[in-house]
């Protein structure tokens, strides 16, 4: 009977040893590695999304300049609108704003300038359309949490110039 009493601690120790395996350690290690893997995978995706957003802004500026260049009623001067007011501001602004990703390019502004700076006074006048906005890198938020000094946003600024098509006195694409 004494052997049964002496054997009890060994059985309890074996049961505790079974409960104290490294299964929990593997879960913690997996969680840490998985979070780091997600962060490392997100960095190129975030930069790719910023590049995509800048390309969309460039295409919107190009389309706005195309519409402005073909508008016979375009008045001389500089006009600017800020999103989301651009949707009801006029044809050039409306069409340009419709091509911008409002969620990715926050605080966007559209500027139309006619004639563009440095163009001739009578022939080959040019129209300039500028799209400018802020992009928020998700990666920068993580760096700020870790104590790094990084900007809140990055400015994306795209512009396009095109020749205004309705110029009087310019026959055959005259020179300046």
Image: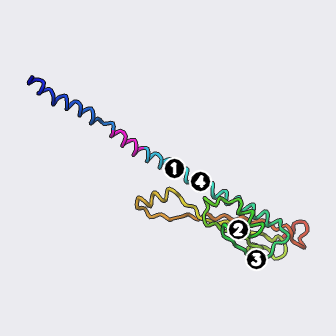
Q: Secondary structure at mark 4?
A: helix
| Nearest to the observer: residue 95 or residue 116 | 95
Residue plotted at (73% across, 75% down) = 78
Instruction: Classify mark 3: helix, strand or loop.
Output: strand
Q: Which residue is the site of mark 1?
A: 42
Q: Which residue is mark 2?
A: 86
Could you tell which of marks 3 and 4 lies nearer the N-terminus? 4
**Between discs 1 and 3, the one toward the N terminus:** 1
Identify the residue shown where x is 77% and y is 65%: 162
Q: Do the numbered discs 4 and 1 sit on residues whose CB atoms are within 8 Å?
A: no
Q: Looking at the image, tell me whether mark 3 or mark 2 is earlier in sequence order.
A: 3
The kind of secondary structure the magenta stretch mainly shows is helix
Looking at this rendering, what residue extends furthest in the front direction? Answer: 1
**Which comes sooner in the sequence, label 2 or label 1?**
1
- Image quarter where the N terminus lies is top left
Q: Residues within 10 Å of mark 1 (few under 14, many from 20)?
A: some
């Amino acid at each position: 009977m004494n052997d049964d009493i002496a054997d009890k601690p060994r059985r309890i120790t074996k049961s505790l040893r079974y409960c104290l395996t490294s299964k929990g350690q593997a879960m913690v290690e997996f969680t840490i590695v998985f979070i780091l893997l997600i962060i490392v995978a997100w960095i190129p995706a975030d930069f790719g999304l910023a590049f995509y957003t800048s390309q969309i802004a460039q295409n919107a500026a190009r389309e706005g300049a195309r519409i402005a260049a073909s508008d016979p009623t375009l008045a001389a001067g500089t006009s600017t609108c800020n999103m989301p007011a651009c949707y009801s501001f006029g044809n050039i602004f409306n069409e340009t704003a419709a091509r911008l990703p409002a969620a990715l390019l926050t605080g966007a502004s559209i500027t139309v300038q006619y004639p563009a700076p440095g163009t001739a006074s009578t022939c080959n006048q040019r129209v300039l359309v500028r799209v400018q906005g802020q992009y928020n890198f998700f990666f920068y938020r993580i760096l700020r949490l870790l104590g790094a000094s990084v900007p809140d946003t990055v400015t994306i600024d795209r512009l396009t110039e095109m020749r205004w098509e309705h110029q009087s006195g310019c026959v055959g694409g005259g020179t300046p």
